[in-house]
């Protein structure tokens, strides 16, 4: 890539330190909790993340919004009476006020009465901004153009200073306006200040902050601050989530008779038997197999104890690990119960939503700051009642009710089950990268030990094996070359092969350190094949390794084994070889039905996730509410029709959108009515919609972005009235390195199609000359996207810089046709070359996605020869039957096989 710097001169210069004297003279900092701004922030570490902006909703004498842009170490500030508007036709008066200290961007709380600006303040929006051109020059000339990337506001904006005859010259009046782009909204849309009224920082309303009577200073950075800041105690092994609110115990309905008992100290866990195929039939429910530590959570509230209630977290061998997972214990202590015994798995979620045992190990053994999540799949005791003899499905109903009020992405989560075709569920689990599935008899009671009523079917083989020795690396480095592995049969350690892969740089050293302490001259194995002992250092067989492998060989050795991590929750002498058993489903089901408790009458059925329940009018894997609801009056598109389209297009659309952060446009009342963008997962979305944690660059905290990977999840978008799906240019497993470059050609509507097609060919030519292989699609509007796949090797700023240079060159060579600025008035007869899709957090319309526009057009991949058509191609969703034959020759089928190594 050519290193071309963005033209933002002035935005990072270091002039004489701007004064805050006026700001300070207006406040008594012995009374108000606002920051005095005693020291300038250190800006170098944030140089690549953009300048900060904040909009604070301020209920003073009159409600208004304080709009602040970071520049030269302070916040340039304007008071906007009505708040920002996404409608470009709205010109909002913005009165410029005194500069505020940089620390002020996090202030949320109450300014006391009698102080300047007395009233309640919340952080209504926050993010980064980018000046378009020279920021200092824009302020001086009274025409400041900029791009916002906030939690609520995005895209291009402008501040225009009014003539000095208006208002106080010491407080010049400006107009704040939204420029026309994809983030703009129309006159009929609700004001964003009404649709999203609460704090972007804490989620609280003005009223809640006023009622709390506190000063919320939500900055974890050492940048100076507020006298009322409460210190946050750093975690030793895991990041601390928001504190749990104390819960008052409330009884849950137990609809089947359950005997009374004292809370057990520990219940040995029920274990699943390995089976070569998942059981079929309606008697079974299925869960994803999680890759973590099996944990039994025990809580008993003792009102007589000084310490009150205390949760215990016990491993499957009853080791107390509470001290190692304090955030999980705190979450359990917040449950609204008197006593409870839960069974579940503590895991670390990877960026793609799967569980990562390696990250879990890093959290426990290396102190890595990964968020621990407790997925609960069973409840054994509740408020003095033994639930273990109840049918599983009844226990799950009680558990679901107990966890119903918890946040969907909190520390404690319900491990949901699925019903339907076990084969389909298993295949989807493997595609998701899960370890496999656990199938459980719905009417079976909880039985400690291994049984045939819980069965596990794995996508790949995995086994716990004992380490009996190691070799050193051949390159002389300090670490491990290979581990010598085995398992116990009776009291003898049986050799099972070795593994020399799966180690990281850290595990190489940490494993070697631990193994050196276990050195022994005694060979721990019962027998060894010839040649195995060569170069091996023997160790006491005390450490247990988690290993994946392809299969067992004829010699009973693991083939192609890879190290995943150490298991500390299981003693070495308990490790046995896992043997698959072909379980008779009929026998297991009959045995469950013979259990007395299983014949108890069910009075309530638990809500279940289903992968096979048909909708009313089509064989869809979801149930639609109001399937006849019209979403587009112009074309007659219904919710049912949208769901059927997503079902039909899924095999072609999913390869382009699966495993990426998404933004969606929801139209509850259809096209032309209220609609809104959504990028975060929340309880209003179907349970099949997944989430991926994306680190917020401002706070450093993960946020749950929408992502999906299954046809069911895509079809479920119809249930939520989603008429547009927009994708990131990077995948969940490499968020910071895009795998596609997008040039958006947005022409003047009056420009002939021939000119737009020629411009796309020109972009194609330039990308090919740079070694890229471009692909083409319509946007569902008047423009085109030229998309080039990349190997994810370069960070966002590099890709954006390359795209910017490309469009600047085109503009310089033909200014009569191209422009690279968003200015609407300058676009007459021209094509706007939008390169801004190539920055972190920006999205582009997904291939095959409909658009929330009259007629429900579709953004569709094109072949390059189709540019020679006499007119712009238009594809509507309701005409799918006419153009679906195109899918047999998908122009984007080979996109990622041609990704360039740049």
Image: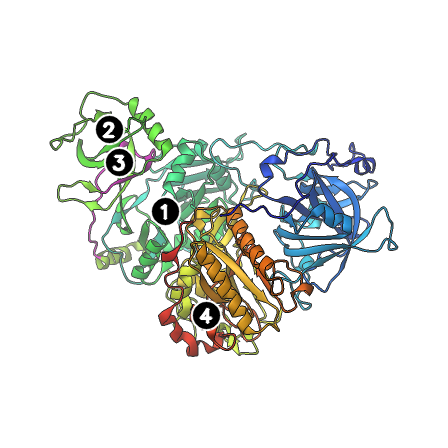
Front: mark 1 or 2:
2
- Left of 143 or right of it: where is 562? left
Which of the two residues, 286 or 896, is positioned nearer the viewer here? 896
Residue 865, position as x, y percentages in the image: 43, 71
Q: Residue at x 65, y 56 (%)?
A: 156
Which of pointers 2 and 3 lies earlier in the amino acid sequence?
2
Q: Residue at x 37, y 66 (%)?
A: 612
Mark 4 highlights which residue? 643
Front: mark 2 or 4:
2
Range of magenta residues: 560-584
Badge 3 density bin: few <14, some 14–19, many ≥20, Cα 10 Å: some
Q: Which mark is residue 471?
A: 2
Mark 1 highlights which residue? 290
In whole angstroms, how far apart are the C-alphas of marks 1 and 3? 25 Å
- Left of 763 or right of it: where is 439? left
Badge 2 density bin: few <14, some 14–19, many ≥20, Cα 10 Å: many
Mark 3 highlights which residue? 500
Which of pointers 4 and 3 lies earlier in the amino acid sequence?
3
Q: Residue at x 47, y 48 (%)?
A: 735
Q: Kindly state the secondary structure of the residue where label 1 is placed.
A: loop
């Amino acid at each position: 890539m050519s290193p071309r710097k963005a033209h933002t001169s002035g935005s990072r210069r270091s002039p004489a330190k701007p004064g805050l004297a006026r700001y300070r003279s207006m406040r008594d900092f012995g009374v108000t909790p606002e920051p005095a701004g005693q020291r300038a922030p250190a800006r170098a570490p944030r140089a690549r993340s953009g300048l900060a902006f904040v909009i604070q909703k301020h209920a003073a004498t009159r409600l208004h919004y304080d709009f602040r842009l970071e520049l030269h170490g302070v916040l340039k500030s304007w008071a906007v009476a009505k708040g920002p508007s996404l409608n470009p036709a709205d010109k909002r008066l913005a009165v410029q006020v005194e500069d505020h200290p940089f620390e002020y961007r996090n202030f949320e709380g109450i300014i006391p009465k009698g102080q300047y600006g007395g009233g309640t303040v919340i952080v209504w929006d926050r993010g980064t901004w980018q000046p378009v051109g020279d920021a200092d020059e824009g302020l001086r000339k009274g025409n400041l153009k900029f791009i916002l990337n906030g939690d609520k506001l995005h895209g291009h904006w402008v501040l225009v200073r009014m003539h000095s005859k208006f208002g106080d010259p010491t407080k010049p009046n400006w107009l704040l306006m939204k420029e026309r782009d994809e983030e703009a909204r129309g006159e009929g849309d609700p004001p964003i200040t009404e649709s999203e009224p609460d704090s972007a920082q804490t989620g609280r309303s003005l009223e809640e902050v006023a009622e709390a009577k506190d000063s919320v200073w939500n900055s974890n950075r050492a940048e100076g601050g507020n006298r009322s800041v409460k210190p946050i105690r750093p975690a030793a092994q895991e990041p601390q989530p928001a504190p749990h609110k104390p819960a008052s115990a409330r009884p849950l309905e137990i609809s089947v008779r359950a005997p009374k008992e004292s809370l057990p100290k520990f219940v040995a866990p029920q274990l699943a038997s390995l089976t070569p195929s998942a059981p079929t039939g309606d008697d079974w429910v299925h869960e994803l197999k999680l890759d973590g530590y099996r944990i039994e959570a025990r809580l008993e509230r003792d009102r007589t104890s000084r310490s009150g209630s205390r949760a215990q977290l016990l491993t499957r061998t009853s080791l107390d690990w509470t001290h190692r997972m304090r955030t999980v214990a705190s979450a359990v202590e917040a449950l609204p119960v008197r006593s409870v015994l839960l069974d579940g798995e503590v895991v670390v979620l990877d960026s793609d939503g799967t569980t990562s045992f390696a990250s879990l190990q890093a959290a426990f053994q290396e102190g890595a700051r990964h968020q621990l999540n407790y997925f609960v799949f069973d409840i054994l005791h509740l408020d003095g009642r033994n639930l273990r003899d109840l049918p599983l499905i009844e226990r799950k109903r009680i558990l679901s009710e107990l966890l119903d009020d918890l946040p969907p992405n909190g520390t404690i989560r319900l491990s949901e089950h699925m019903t339907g075709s076990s084969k389909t569920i298993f295949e989807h689990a493997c595609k998701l990268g899960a370890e496999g599935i656990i199938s459980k008899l719905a009417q079976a009671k909880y039985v400690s030990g291994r049984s045939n009523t819980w069965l596990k079917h794995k996508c790949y083989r995995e086994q716990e094996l004992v380490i009996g020795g190691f070799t050193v690396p051949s390159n002389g480095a300090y670490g491990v070359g290979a581990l010598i592995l085995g398992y116990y049969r009776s009291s003898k350690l049986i050799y099972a092969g070795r593994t020399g892969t799966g180690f990281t740089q850290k595990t190489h050293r940490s494993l070697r350190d631990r193994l050196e302490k276990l050195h022994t001259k005694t060979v721990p194995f019962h027998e060894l094949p010839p040649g195995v002992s060569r170069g091996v250092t023997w160790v006491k067989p005390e450490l247990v390794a988690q290993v994946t492998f392809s299969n067992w060989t004829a010699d009973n050795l693991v083939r192609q084994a890879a190290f995943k991590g150490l298991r500390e929750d299981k003693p070495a002498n308990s490790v046995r070889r896992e043997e698959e058993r072909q379980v008779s489903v009929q026998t297991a089901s009959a045995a469950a039905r013979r259990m007395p408790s299983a014949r108890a009458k069910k009075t309530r059925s638990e809500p279940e996730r289903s992968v096979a329940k048909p909708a009313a009018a089509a064989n869809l894997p979801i149930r639609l509410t109001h399937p006849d609801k019209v979403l587009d009056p112009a074309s007659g598109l219904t919710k049912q029709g949208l769901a059927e389209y997503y079902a039909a297009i899924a095999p072609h659309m999913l390869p382009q959108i699966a495993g990426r952060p998404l933004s969606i446009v929801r139209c509850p009342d259809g096209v032309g009515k209220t609609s809104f963008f959504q990028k975060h997962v929340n309880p209003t979305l179907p349970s099949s919609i997944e989430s991926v944690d994306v680190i917020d660059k401002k706070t450093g905290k993960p946020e749950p972005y929408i992502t999906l990977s299954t046809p069911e999840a895509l079809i479920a978008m119809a249930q939520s009235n989603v008429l547009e799906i927009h994708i990131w240019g990077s995948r969940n497993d490499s968020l910071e390195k895009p795998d596609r470059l997008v040039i958006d050609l947005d022409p003047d509507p009056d420009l002939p199609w021939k000119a737009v097609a020629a411009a796309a060919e020109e972009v194609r030519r330039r990308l090919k000359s740079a070694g890229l292989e471009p692909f083409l699609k319509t946007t569902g509007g008047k423009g085109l996207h030229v998309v080039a796949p990349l190997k994810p090797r370069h960070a966002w700023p590099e890709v954006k810089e390359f795209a910017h240079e490309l469009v600047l060159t085109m503009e310089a060579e033909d200014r009569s046709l191209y422009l690279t600025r968003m200015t609407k008035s300058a676009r007459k007869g021209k094509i706007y070359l939008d390169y801004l899709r190539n920055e972190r957090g920006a999205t582009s319309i997904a291939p095959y996605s409909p658009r929330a526009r009259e007629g429900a057009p579709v953004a569709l991949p094109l072949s390059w020869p189709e540019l020679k058509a006499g007119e712009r191609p238009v594809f509507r969703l309701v005409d799918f039957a006419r153009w679906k034959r195109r899918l047999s020759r998908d122009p984007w089928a080979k996109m990622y096989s041609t990704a360039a190594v740049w």
